[in-house]
Amino acid sequence: MGRITRQVGALLASAALVAGAAACNSGSGSAGSPDSSGTAASSDPPVTPAEPLRFYPVVRESQGTCPAGKASYIRDGHSDSCLRLAAPALTVTQLRSARAARIEGGTWAVQIVLRPADRARFGTLTKKLSANQPPRNKLALVLGTAPGGRLLTAPVVMSRISTGSVQITGGFTKSSAQRLVHDLGA
C-alpha cells in the first residue's frame, strides 16, 4: 500500500502520512493498540471536524518566513519553511473515523478513514502528486483554511493511495494525538 514520508531536517520534527488497509482499516489494531478514549470504530457514526480538513497541493517550498497577508502560503514550523499552496484539491467535512493509536515503536499517531465519497478523489489526487518532482509532490493537510488554519502535516506523496485510510505520525504524545482527534470531531 502507499507510504508517504515527510522530509525534514531533524528526526524529532519528522512527520509521516501512511496509508493502507493494514494501518487503518483493520479493526484488529495491527498498526498499534488504539487509545480507548480517542478511538472511533468503523461502526461509529461519521466524524465531523469543527473546521473542514483541506488537502492542498504544494507549489513551492522555501526556508524562512512566509510573506505577510498572503492566503496561498502557510508556515511549516516542523521544517522551518514556508509552503506556497495551490487551491485546495479536496475539502473534507466529514470523516468515516478518526482515532489516536499507539503504533510501532511505542509512538502515537492519528488514524483517519475517509468516507467513500472522498476516497476516489483522494486516490486521484495522490496519484497525480506522486508523479510530480519536489516540492510539487507534497500534500499539505490543513484543518481550516490557509494561512490561518492548522497545518497537520505536509508529506511527500510517493504513490497513489486508494484505500482512503491515512495515518498521521511524527512527534505526537498521547495527549497531542487525542487533542487532534478531538479537533477532527471524534
Image (cartoon, rainbow, N blue to C red):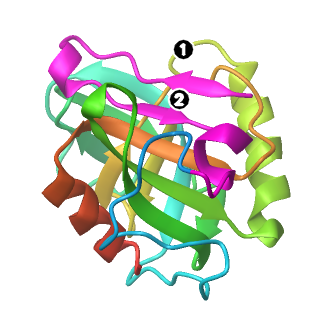
Looking at the rendered structure, the number of numbered marks drawn on it comes to: 2
**Mark linked to residue 15:** none
> Could you classify mark 2 by the number of other residues whose Cα lies within 10 Å: few (under 14), some (14-19), or many (20 or more)?
many
Quadrant in the picture for the C terminus:
bottom left
Query: Do the CB atoms of the residues marked 1 and 2 lie less than 8 Å apart?
Result: yes
Residue at the disc numbered 2: 138
Quadrant in the picture for the N terminus:
top right
Q: Amino acid at mark 2?
A: Lys
Position of residue 87 relative to residue 91, above or below, is above
Residue 101 in magenta stretch: no
Residue range corresponding to the magenta coloring: 1-28
The secondary element bearing badge 1 is classed as loop
Position of residue 21 relative to residue 92, above or below, is above
Residue that appears at 42% across and 69% down: 39
Residue 156 appears in the picture as rendered? yes
Residue 149 horizontal/vertical position (percent): 30, 63
Residue 23 horizontal/vertical position (percent): 59, 41
Residue at the disc numbered 1: 134
Residue 20 in magenta stretch: yes
Would you say 150 lies left or right of 58 here? Answer: left
The secondary element bearing badge 2 is classed as loop
Residue 20 appears in the picture as rendered? no
Residue that appears at 39% across and 29% down: 104
Position of residue 121 relative to residue 73, above or below, is below
Would you say 73 lies left or right of 60 here? Answer: left
Residue 60 horizontal/vertical position (percent): 45, 26
In this rendered view, identify the residue nearer to me: 28 or 107. Answer: 28
Would you say 73 lies left or right of 163 here? Answer: left
